[in-house]
Amino acid sequence: MIRISTSMIFNQGVTNMQARSVELAKTQNQLSNSRRILTPSDDPIASARSLEIEQSQSINLQYQRNTASASTSLSLSENTLTTATTLLQDVKTIAVNAGNGALSSNELKSIGSDLRARYQELIGLANATDGNGQYLFSGYQGSTKPFAETAPGTVAYFGDQGSRLTQITASRQIPVSDSGGDVFQLVKNGNKTFATAATGANTGTAVISPGEVIDPTKWNVAGNSKNFTVKFSVDTQLPPVTTYDIVDNVSGFSLLTGVAAAVTGPYLRTYTDAGNISLKTQAPPDTNATPFDYGAQLAVKGSPATGDTFTVKASTNVDVFATIYSLITAVETATDNPAGNAALANKLNSAMTDVDNSLDNVLRVRATIGSRLNEVDTATSSSQDLVVQYQSTLSGLRDLDYAKAISDLTQQQMVLQAAQQSFAKIQTLSLFNYLQL
Amino acid sequence: MATSIFGIGLSGLNAAQASLASTSHNITNSANGAFHRQTAIQGTQDPQLGAGGFFGKGATVETVVRSYDRFLEGAVLQAQGQGSYLDAYNKQITQIDNLLADPTSGMSPALQTFFSGVQDVASNPSSVPSRQAMISQANAMVSRFATFDSRFEQLRSGVNSEISDSITQINATAKSIADMNDQIIASLSSDSKPANDLLDKRDALVANLNKLIHTSVITESSGSISVFIGTGQTLVIGNQSYSLKAAPSTADPKDFDISYQSGGSTTAINASNLQGGSLGALLDFRTQTLDTVQNNLGRTAIVLAQTFNDQHRLGQDLNGVAGQNFFNVPTPTVLVNSNNTGTAAITATNTAVGSLTGSDYRLQFAAGNWTFTRLTDNTKTVFLPAAFPVTIDGITLASPSGTPLAGDSYLIQPTRTGSRDISVAITDTAKIAAAAPIRTNVPLTNTGSGTITAGTVNSPPPQNANILQPVTLTFTGASAFSVTGTGTGNPVGVAYTPGANITYNGWTVQVSGAPAIGDTFTISPNTNGVADNRNALLLAGLQTKNTVEGTANYQSSYSQLVSSVGNRAREIQVQSDAQEVLVQQATTAQQSLSGVNLDEEAANLIRFQQAYQASGKVLSVAATLFDTILGIRP
């Protein structure tokens, strides 16, 4: 026979009611906090996991802030370079105007002062700063003014080639600055392989073209000094015959004869106006023992005078300021005579090529900025997707299922009530109530 | 005959009265949990041979027994001891569980905010407000670490005072049991009948003792009980009790150890031998949970401080000076056992924080050898004194000064004080080393397509003494370059592989592309590099790097901690709930035999009342019979 002691009936009743109350209190606590996990022990795995996700979420938020700041920096550079692009295009238009041949030296001088203003404006743009007063184009040296005119026409770069980076995703650090050297200095002159120029002492009216490379491999062949002079000589016949020689400035030999260059003409090749001057053996008339072919050609237009020379040199980097300044000097020193016009035309030609090159370079940098901005946008939108994803994962791990919690609460309430009512009933039962002792 | 009827009636009255007394005793003690229901056992008096056979002489009360079953009692004792262990453990671990629970005050928001600060400096390396924010957030994080540590220390001193209280209670209970033994022996010697209520009292004392600590109880033939604890230490024998003492441990004065006192001598009892009960729970909680949690959080702090410093020192601050320590890195604690007789002083340093385990260690000298024991799993490393300095688990022990004697021991806590001692070493915003000390340059005159990377500084710190010396790489052929610059040894004809590491003076760069002959690349000091954020990016990257034991980043080492505490707390809660059911079942079974049921007692009351009334009737019949005899008129 199973006995039960009276105190056990009480104890069990009380214990059970307490257990139900604890459950009820916990559900109530969950509801009022709107959290499923109140302490890590409620769900240790989900707690640890949610901490990890919180970190990912916080890092993701940080990346969002970083992309915003990257976007600002890049846009700032982009805006500055857009202005620089317009400015260079204006400079080119001005140069084209200056070269139309109808302008007097005085008119040219006023063009010169216009160009000077552009020149200063460009230096200003190159020294642009961001909202924090940091120079945009000084590399790592944010507080060092990157460009300053150290002598008329000479603008020195005081920055470095460092590129400031911003972490926009876990695996990507994007450059948000461009070195001023890269934007404004790394510009090859001439046709980017070689540059042609008239010597200042020319008396004829000949104008040289920028020339072109037909075969870069041949141009880069070993033994090419990439430094030549084209010399002209006009004889006394009628009509006069103009001849030219191509001299290797390094060896002092004529390319055409293969021996030391003759000081005076006539030379081997005959000049035709606007005809190609090829850097390749043409036998006859060339007589050199070893034929040469540097895969390049150029053209001279107009009438060279005896002793007129043109140089052909490998391209070097000429900064955009020097290019504009050479335009300024060209228009300001122009003289009103045919030789002066030719000199101006020669200078304008090479300067315009260089302005084009500068423009190309600025556009190249703008293109990279554009693609970086695109990348930043992509990173922003993917991190926005992540925000939602992390949020929903976190919510799944931690947040309360209200429907379930409320139904639990109701059920637990009911059970507690039943426990209380049954306890109240049972505790009144006693044989003593019925005994008439 | 009438005399015998009188006698029988009287014996019936007495027996019924005795039973009524027992029943009343039961009723009045029905709410006493330690009480065992008593029954007056009635028997018959020896019969008398009369005419025609043996005639009964009435009832007698043989003894009063208590309803007691040794096995049921043992089950309750066992269940209650375990239940008390789990309750006490639960009470302690819940505090840590709650501490870690709050999503806003936990460690992880502080860690995240700090690294957001680092990222902000990376985005705006020259901004003083960003730098100030990073230092402030570092301070906030450090103080969060310290808050956790002080909470752990509170728990530790709480555990110590609870241990002291438990010991006082154990001593008092042991004394009471010894007194009860004395009374029970005395009552048994005067009368061989059991002193039920005294036994109940003694049982209750044993049950109370068992809730404090697991005991073994042996009943002696004299009726006294002997109580043993631990590995057989006698707590009570006969009317004699011995006492325990709680005092600061000889190995670590912050923790209380328990020793056994007998005959004027004191012997330490190994905590691992004191099992069960609330005292066992306190001791287990301290070693299994509190030490582990505090050590592991300390380890996170140390790894964070050290790895952050290592990267920070590779950088360059706003003043153009090499970065110094950003945090003060906590150092291991070496505790000299107060019983040591030698003079050796041990120093330990954390030399490879990535290998730290979070365990404490004991270094012991015996028989000419040192033994280094990892306390979490008792892995021992034995080495000779000549082997110093020794590095184990990222801790380096320097050669001790002084002379050790056999038996000397030292407790080494590499990470215990980590979260207390971590602090921010710099206050000047300019001293945050966001930049790298070098930069590279490609001159405009280069004609080839060669490019050079921005360069990195080789770890570990300190930076190479020549790192700021300008170095030039000059290409002398399509696949060879020469190096000029102080500290490089000016090598000539170094083979060039595009993209390969080129390392001199503590930096590494990569050149790629096709440099032309005569092209140069320069590596120069990063003077005025205030907008350079390369080092800040590397510092920010530490947040997700697996720096803790090579498998976890700072945050995940913390979440492992949260998860391990959460799991343990859950385990204890589940066990505790289950144990409650077991206690209830065991108690129900025990009460089913020994408990008082008032309905039953009410019925007994009626029964014995009626027996009493009936016996009274017997007397009255006897009187009538006697009157009948007296009424005969011869």
Image (cartoon, coloured by chain):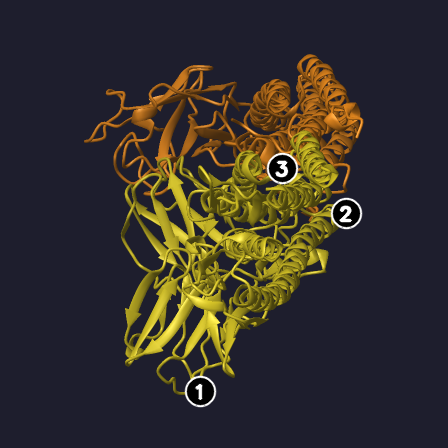
Chain colours: A orange, B yellow
Q: Which residue is mark 3?
A: A322
Q: State the separation of the CA atoms marked 1 and 3.
A: 79 Å
Q: Which residue is mark 1?
A: B343
Task: Report helix, strand or loop for mark 1.
Answer: loop
Q: State the separation of the CA atoms marked 3 and 2.
A: 40 Å
Task: Report helix, strand or loop for mark 3.
Answer: helix
Identity, as a three-letter code, of the amino acid under mark 2: Pro
Q: Looking at the image, which is closer to me, B450 or A265?
A: B450
Q: Chain of mark 3?
A: A
The location of residue B120, given as percent across then percent down, is: 68, 41
Q: Residues within 10 Å of mark 2 (few under 14, many from 20)?
A: few
Identity, as a three-letter code, of the amino acid under mark 1: Thr
B545 left or right of A21?
A: left
Which of discs 3 and 2 lies nearer the camera? The answer is 2
State whether residue B5 is above or below residue B359: above
Q: Residue at x 40, y 38 (%)?
A: B450
Q: Which residue is mark 2?
A: B129
**Pointer 3 and pointer 2: residues touching (CB < 8 Å)?**
no
Q: Looking at the image, which is closer to me, A160 or A8?
A: A8
Identity, as a three-letter code, of the amino acid under mark 3: Ala
The location of residue A236, given as percent across then percent down, is: 43, 25
Q: Chain of mark 1?
A: B
Q: Residue at x 51, y 66 (%)?
A: B332
